[in-house]
Image (cartoon, helix red, strand yellow):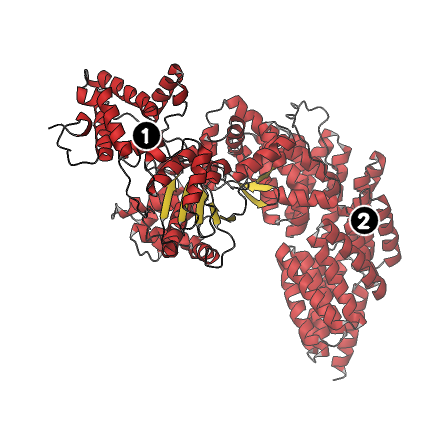
Amino acid sequence: MGGVGGFDGGIESRSPRAAFAAKLTRLWEAAGNPTLQRVADTAEARMRAARAPESNRSALPQRISDWRSGRNVPSRYESFEPVLVTLVRLAEAASGPVPSTLSNRTAWRRLWKAAIAEPVRPTVTTTLRRDIGTLVGRDAEVRRIIEAAGPGRVVSIHTVDGMPGIGKTALITRAAHLLSDRFPDGRFFVELNTHTPGHSPTEPADVLATLLTDLGIAPGHIPDSLDARRDLWRDRVAAKRMLLVLDDARDHAQIEPLLPAAAGCLTLITSRRRLVALDNALPLSLDTLTPDNAADLFCLLAQRDPSGRDADAVGEIVRWCGFLPLAIVLLAGRVAHHPTWTLSGLAAEFATAQDRLGELDSGDRAVRAAFTTSYNNLRPDLQRLFRRLGLHPGPDFDEYAAAALDDIPLARARRALEALYTDHLVDETTPGRYRMHDLLREYAHDLAATDTPGDRADALDRLHSYYCDTAATADRYLRLVTQPTDPTAVRPPRAPIPSPRNLRDTAEALAWMRRERANFLAFIEHSSSHDQPSRAIELIDALSSLLFREGPWPQAGELHRRAIELARRIDDPFAEANACLGLGIIGHRTGDKHEAAEILERARRIYQRLGNRLGDANALLGLGLLHYRTGVYQDAADLLQQALTIYRELDDRVGQTASVTHLGAAHWRRGDFPGAVRLLNEALSLSLDPGNFHELYALTYLTLVLADSGDLPGAVDAAQRTLTLARAVGDRMIEAVALGISASARYRSGDRQAAIELGQEAIAMLHDAGDQIMEAEALNRFGAALAETGEHGKALALFTVGLQLARQVNSPLHEARALDGLARSRASLGDINTAITELRDAITIYQHIGSAETDSATVYLTTLQQALDNG
């Protein structure tokens, strides 16, 4: 006896719906198990060719999948017939004639009628995914959802967004299971398939058909239009308490029709996009795991309990995974299946892997596959920008850098970055600045390899132009000297950039250089490793003003040594001399005066050989600064005067300001306070831009002169001016120096508590900055203030540290001052013998460097010796 609709095969006991699904599955197998997408595309083309009005709804893969599984039945036979014809043709092509039991359309129509007429038994459906027991590090996020979804909730829609592989579905599934008891009328999990390989995003009309069927509505009674289905869905759940999970949503248009209107319902949504257009939703953006939680997840899934070296190795492994849950899950799974692997060996292998994404490959669950589905959903222009951002060698970027890389106007770059941010393909670290996750950056860089070498080179040329051109603008406010250039050199013009950046003052220049420091350093490494020595030299030169101003000095020295080596390699004497000048000036900060003097003399010889007067003056200035910093004030003044003469001949205002400023400082150190004040005021009048490097130094020295000449109120006022300007432009070094001067002046004036706080803050700032000479200066100055007020025990502690620092950086002046201070405090505490020894050492140094402090120290030594002789 035949089965329902003439379909035999021992399924008489099956319901018409089950028989329809079973017969369709059998035909599918006869057709060679084609993909859902292939069948849907072919059927849709057949519909268009037939131009049947009743067949204008597409046969989407999700709908066909529901028919084959028995979850749903076609609402119209006409929408099913193109799929039937497609499968029969495929079966004929695969194995010849198809049995009539599978191909007879009359039998199929009878079976369809029976299936669609079959009443659907109403059910309360729970279709939640299974909850995994390995959700780690998301307790706070789960708690936030649970608490916000409580009985007194205000919002009934919660979204969880994040980059591919961040663990959105696992989080929302855990929350849904914990909430399920509160929603007895149904708990539905809907896969929207926006990023599922091999699937098109599920249309809301198909989702609604499935949900309505789950609620017990016969397929024949489900309306055709999206609006009608939405209204029926909202009507049927209006009085219910239901939980709806929408996983992997595309956008607002896909979600909105699916949202229940009832207050008793709760909807949890995951998406790789920030669903900013979804009204009345509470968003939660997921970040990568913390290092500790990432390590815990790895050990749990790898079934390892590491200690010692292996524990350290786990930290390295999860760092190379970028703390991304999907990457950690895949790698830990491999480890669990390889018990002979050592974690330290895996860490070493992963650290040197040329293709980390390849190491994280596991079919459709591969990290690369997850990234690809997001990339494929981008517009072509956004795909291009994404690839070019992968070329950026630095850790972060802004709209200007993006515009340069992609050769687009600034406004377009801004909108494009916002679009990539919305899709979680870049993160916004601070307003207007973005970064890529390490694995996404590697993925984008791999994609960029599909572009032509010329396109990649042009993008990096524009980026180089942007950084160097903007640095040149910043250098107007930050430079110590005007950099000489080779008038005979023929250099190719820089690549034009679409959106130059304008820096309007010292504050903007300094802030920009600080923000981009890491990018400059990364670009220098990139240029060096890609055999682009001229580019590396230019980038080091562009960064030199900031490095001299703020350090770190060892890094600055290493970069300039590299520039010297590269310049020699390409036989560029101008570049070599400029790099020597930079290294010599940085030597002021490190205290290696012998190397600094030698390298500055070399720079001067090269400039003289090239006949470059500006370079010669710069080298003289550098040598003058070096002698000043080491306390040889007369030699410093002579060298600075020679430099000033040349700068005046060349009408170079920057050099004149620098020379006059430090000439004033040299007069101060030699005790000529009126001469120092005159020169420092002249320097302030020469300064071109408010808050520039030399104006700040001139104000600082003027403050010191006033303090040492006994004008404490004037020193406090001048320190406040300096402090205000330093803070306005963001110069923390000068800010710290001004704080130290103000502290010592206030202490002497009697405002001791405020002075102590300022002094401690100044010393801490200078210590953090790594300028040991200025830290020694502050320690000695504040120690002297304490000694003057009888706090000799505290003063001794400061002088002792100051002496250690001065000797470390080979600064004779600060060494002598520390010894002088120690001697005076020890004498006051009764240790005259030690005081005399230390004071003699101080006088020897004072005499050697020509310090004006020799006389007062000598007088005090006589007093101490008389006191010792008198018993």
Q: Which residue is mark 2?
A: 661
Quarter the N terminus occupies: top left
Residue sitting farthest toward the left: 1
Q: 582 or 603: which is nearer to us?
A: 582
| The quarter of the displayed image where residue 330 is located | top left
Q: Nearer the viewer, residue 433 or 755?
A: 433
Residue 755: image x %, image y %? 74, 68
Question: Secondary structure under badge 2?
Answer: helix
User: What kind of element bears circle 1?
Assistant: loop
Q: Is residue 288 above or below residue 388?
A: below
- Does 381 appear above or below 294? above
Quadrant of the image occupied by residue 43 = top left
Can residue 165 be seen by looking at this rendering? no
Residue 78 visible to an observer of this rendering:
yes
Q: Residues within 10 Å of mark 2 (few under 14, many from 20)?
A: many
Q: As displayed, is residue 820 above or below residue 567?
A: below
Q: Quadrant of residue 104?
A: top left
Q: Is residue 209 left or right of residue 869?
A: left
The three-letter code of the residue at mark 2 reads Thr
Residue 823: which numbered mark, if any?
none
Look at 79% across and 76% down and name the residue there: 863
What's the CA distance linking mark 2 and mark 1? Answer: 88 Å
Within 10 Å of disc 1 (Cα), the crowding (few <14, some 14-19, many 20+) is some
Left or right of 656, for residue 418: left
Q: Is residue 699 left or right of residue 159?
A: right
Q: Residue at x 66, y 24 (%)?
A: 491
User: Residue 703, how many percent across, how many down?
Assistant: 81, 58
Q: Position of residue 150 (x, y in %)?
A: 45, 58
Q: Which mark is residue 74?
A: 1
**Front residue of this view, candidates 688 and 189:** 189
What is the three-letter code of the residue carrying label 1? Pro
User: Quadrant where the C terminus lies?
Assistant: bottom right
